Image (cartoon, rainbow, N blue to C red):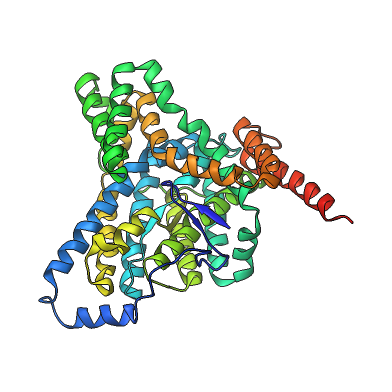
Amino acid sequence: MSGTTADGGAHDVTADGRPGGGAGQPPVPGAGQESVAARAAGPGISRGGFFHAATAGVVAAFVGFASSFAVVLEGLTRVGASREQAASGLMALCLAMGTCAIFLSLRSGMPISTAWSTPGAALLAGSARPGGGFAAAVGAFLVAGVLMVVSGLWKPLGRWVSAIPKPLANAMLAGILLPLCLAPAHAVKSDPAIGLAVVVAWAAVGSVRKLYAVPAAVVVAVVLIATTTHIAADSLGPMWPHPVPVAPHFTVPALIGIALPLYVVTMASQNIPGIAVLNVNGYEPAPGPLFGWTGAFTLLAAPLGGHAVNLAAITAALCAGEEAGPDRGGRYRASAVAGAMYILLGLGAAAAVAFVNASPPNVIEAVAGLALLGALGNSLQAAMADADRREAAVVTLVVTVSGVTFLGVSGAFWGLAAGGALYAVRHWRARRP
């Protein structure tokens, strides 16, 4: 199926995570063995190569965090997390995906990059608070993690996800993203000075280097908010994060409305494209174990409020490409450094939450919307490309955007169900003699 990454990249891939087309570079011969040998040779080997790898890792972590942490906080808050629980969830995600990246990179000798599920966070941001509150959402996070582990151990489940018609999967993702992507326009209307400055910074930097557009918008927003908004010290709250365990509560509406869509968008928009990015850069890890391990780290993060850990896409390209140095067998260091940086950034989770909560809400939402514009564009393009399936994709998009909630289940599920029903009817009639 076609996966659209949270950062706007699109990849045609198979159920096993292999590219479905295009000429990629050849796999790295003995990439894992080569890096093991390099490690055994001692610290004097390829200092320049390590510098390139470390620089790429630091940049990847900063871009990954700055580009979408606001989306994560918005999503956790919408499904019932308090300020302390949101900070705990952000910290847990950073610690889990950082540790996961270090473990997988050193274990495989390949640049395996991990991230939180940005489309999953967007799904949460468009959802209503579930019955049972944040505890029910945490129960759904755990179920999504179990499904990812099962996908790594049992291939048919991954094939079922890939069997979802790609126009419908992309239309559902577009419907999840569209309301969030309207935030920049609302910010310009409500606070023209800051809103326009953030949008102009995003557009100007993006015209030169798209990768840094959203981080630039974040920096401009932080500077303007700090200099133009009075933030009382007592409104910031605690600045050092601490874990807040949440006892999970399992409800049928949360499982259907949160867990299943979270699993589908994470697999289709993050994990499978993440494998494709590695393949294109010449690395061919077995997809199953990577899906399983990211699911396992999701299970570790979920009780503390983290929604999903998965393979990265754009930051994977940073760590697996030429930016990480000429020694392709040593690029695993970039992912390991990125993992260490994520752990450090996780320690600032409470400060990030405190600043976001004390800031004008429209501005922070605008940054989140700008971060998702690329993914929205690619999702819409992939959803509407097939004329025969376009009507079903439009139904999926419209129902998802409507935010309709029925039996406590959110619109993302009903959008996919409605579009899938129309697609099935059209497909059945087309096959009749």
Seen in the image, is 374 located left or right of residue 258? left
Q: x%, y% of residue 209? A: 28, 43
Farthest right residue in view: 433
Q: Judge by depth and name the residue closer to the eye, 418 or 388.
A: 388
Q: Judge by depth and name the residue closer to the eye, 191 or 74.
A: 191
Q: Judge by depth and name the residue closer to the eye, 338 or 425.
A: 425
Q: Is residue 237 visible?
A: no
Q: Is residue 148 visible?
A: yes
Q: Could you tell me how many numbered marks the image carries? A: 0
Seen in the image, is 114 located left or right of residue 307? left
Q: Is residue 199 above or below residue 47?
A: above
Q: x%, y% of residue 214? A: 32, 39
Q: Residue at x 64, y 68 (%)?
A: 156
Q: x%, y% of residue 224? A: 23, 25
Q: x%, y% of residue 22? A: 47, 63
Q: Quadrant of the N terminus?
A: bottom right
Q: Residue at x 70, y 35 (%)?
A: 406
Seen in the image, is 391 located left or right of residue 119? right
Q: Quadrant of the C terminus?
A: bottom right
